[in-house]
Amino acid sequence: SLTLIAYLRLLLGNPAKAERELGWKREVNFESLVREMVEADLKASKSLVEDQN
């Protein structure tokens, strides 16, 4: 969402420790994660536009 941009901070993560110590495995690859996030933002933006009409 456009209003979120003002509040963004650089977020970085490395799952190696969780993989190593907890046996955790990612279920979603990076490309799919980005696609889901973009689709959610587009849906939210569309909803905001529709609410204005």
Image (spheres, rainbow, N blue to C red):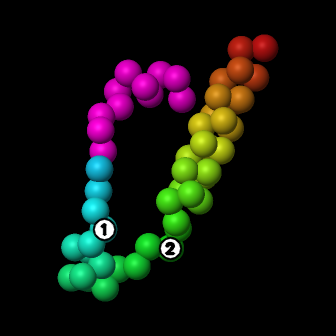
Instruction: Please give left or right for residue 30 compared with residue 19 in the image.
Output: right
Estimate the x, y position of residue 16 in percent, counting from the top left.
27, 72
Q: Which residues are magenta?
A: 1-11
Estimate the x, y position of residue 25 in percent, counting from the top left.
40, 79
Q: Residue at x 52, y 66 (%)?
A: 29
Q: Secondary structure at mark 1?
A: loop
Estimate the x, y position of residue 49 in percent, counting from the top left.
71, 20
Residue placed most toward the observer, 4 or 48 = 4
Quadrant location of the C terminus in the rendered image: top right
Q: Residue at x 60, y 42 (%)?
A: 38
Residue placed most toward the observer, 31 or 49 = 31
Q: Amino acid at mark 1?
A: Pro
Look at mark 2 in the image and give the residue it sits on: 27
Instruction: Please give left or right for residue 24 compared with residue 42 in the image.
Output: left
Estimate the x, y position of residue 5 in percent, counting from the top left.
43, 25
Q: Amino acid at mark 2?
A: Glu
Look at mark 1 in the image and give the residue it sits on: 15
Q: Is residue 34 magenta?
A: no
Q: Secondary structure at mark 2?
A: loop
| N-terminal-most mark, 2 or 1 | 1
Q: Would you place residue 25 above or below residue 8 in this image?
A: below
